[in-house]
Image (spheres, grey):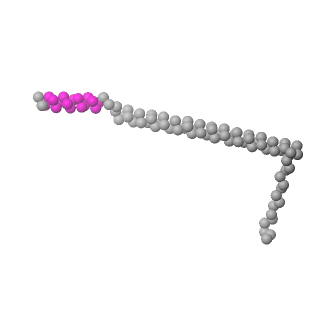
Amino acid sequence: MKKLATLLVIGVVAFMYSCGPSAKELEEKRIADSIKVADSMAMVMAEQQRVADSIAKVQMEKMKADSIAHADSIAKKLIKPAKKVKEVKKGKK
């Protein structure tokens, strides 16, 4: 009877072990998960780059508009143009 019980326990353990995923399936799942993570990270980085480009574009447009407004103010004599700074020659003390 002990031999039969031992044989049954070994059989159940072997059956339970064989029901789980194989090493190959585990490796495939690990690779698929890492690819999914890499794709997600690439999407996040692309979105961050898009936002940074958008901000840079808006800043350039604002600088351009400010420059045009400044030039118009000078043309309408609302403000005086900036004085030019003379360069100091090197070598003289």
- Magenta stretch? 3-18
The quadrant in which residue 5 appears is top left
Image point (61%, 40%), residue name: 49
In reply to whether residue 73 is colored magenta, the answer given is: no
> Considering only vertical position in the picture, is 69 above or below 2?
below
Q: Residue furthest left?
A: 1
Type of secondary structure dominating the magenta stretch: helix
Q: Quadrant of residue 75?
A: top right
User: Does the segment drawn in magenta span residue 15?
Assistant: yes
Please state the horizontal and vertical placement of residue 27, each as a whole percent of the image: 39, 36
Residue at 68% over, 41% down: 56
Q: Nearer the viewer, residue 13 or 24?
A: 13
Question: Where is residue 52 drawn, in percent x and y?
Answer: 63, 41
Which image quarter: residue 67? top right
Front residue (pair 41, 85): 85
How far from the left and from the top, in percent, is residue 34? 46, 37
Q: Answer left or right for 29 relative to 16.
A: right
Q: Position of residue 36 (x, y in %)?
A: 48, 34
* Residue for point 59% across, 39% down: 48
Nearest the viewer among 89 and 14 is 89
Q: Between residue 24 and residue 67, name the one nearer to us.
A: 67
Question: Total of numbered circles in the picture?
Answer: 0
Q: Is residue 72 left or right of residue 12?
A: right
Specify the quadrant that holds the N terminus: top left
Left or right of 90? Residue 9 is left
* The C terminus, quarter of image: bottom right
